[in-house]
Image (cartoon, rainbow, N blue to C red):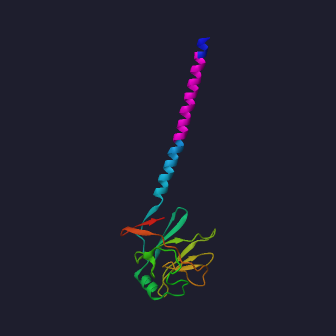
């Protein structure tokens, strides 16, 4: 009879050990996943964009954390036009704009040659188009459905829809061709 009790006791101990080991693996998996997620959040606080090869009056778009960014390389002619002719703008001096202190001027940028801005989310089936600069106009960013437009400084053009300028993210130039953008 004692052998049966010893065997039952041994089986109970083995089963409890197996359950404990299984639970420890499950807990380890959850903790490891949580640690990985927190590391990912820290990594997503910045993004690096290399603008090497971006031609004047062309753009580069980046999708980051569910939002769109645009980088426009402005030509010297376009920069001159943006400074000299504010045009028909809703907020030409960007008094009501979301932008860092360094962007509180006509070009709204850290480097004159490049505009870095958050793009509005267009309606389904719509796109944001870049209308190149011409001799008379400094170029525009246009929502294909609503017709809302901004100049190459991200300032809203009057009469084209919502009167808000594009938001400028906090960013720094790490090298002459690499921008780091902060969330």
Position in image of residue 115 (x %, y %): 45, 75
Position in image of residue 17 (x %, y %): 55, 28
Q: Residue at x 56, y 73 (%)?
A: 128
Residue at the top extreme, as displayed:
1
Whether residue 51 is visible:
no
Q: Is 42 above or below relative to 82?
A: above
Q: Is 42 above or below relative to 149?
A: above
Q: Residue at x 60, y 70 (%)?
A: 122
Would you say residue 138 sits in the magenta stretch?
A: no
Q: Residue at x 60, y 16 (%)?
A: 5
Residue at the left extreme, as displayed:
175
Position in image of residue 46 (x %, y %): 45, 62
The residue lying toward the viewer, choosing from 162 and 104, is 104
Would you say residue 15 sits in the magenta stretch?
A: yes
Q: Which residues are magenta?
A: 6-28
Q: Residue at x 58, y 69 (%)?
A: 121
Position in image of residue 171 (x %, y %): 43, 69
Q: Is 9 above or below relative to 127?
A: above
Q: Quadrant of the N terminus?
A: top right
Whether residue 47 is visible:
yes
């Amino acid at each position: 009879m004692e052998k049966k009790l010893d065997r039952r006791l041994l089986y109970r101990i083995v089963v409890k050990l197996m359950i404990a080991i299984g639970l420890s693996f499950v807990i380890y998996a959850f903790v490891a996943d949580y640690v990985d997620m927190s590391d990912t959040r820290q990594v997503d606080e910045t993004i690096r964009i290399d603008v090497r090869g971006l031609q004047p009056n062309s753009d580069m778009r980046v999708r980051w954390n569910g939002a769109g960014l645009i980088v426009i390389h402005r030509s010297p002619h376009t920069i001159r036009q943006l400074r000299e002719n504010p045009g028909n703008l809703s907020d030409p001096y960007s008094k009501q704009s979301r932008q860092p202190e360094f962007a509180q001027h006509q070009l709204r940028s850290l480097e004159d040659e490049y505009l870095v801005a958050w793009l509005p989310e267009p309606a389904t089936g719509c796109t944001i188009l870049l209308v190149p600069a011409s001799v008379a106009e400094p170029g525009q960013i246009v929502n294909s459905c609503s017709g809302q437009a901004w100049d190459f400084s991200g300032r809203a053009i009057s009469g084209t829809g919502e009167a808000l300028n594009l938001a400028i993210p906090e960013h720094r130039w790490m090298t002459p061709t690499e921008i780091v953008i902060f969330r």
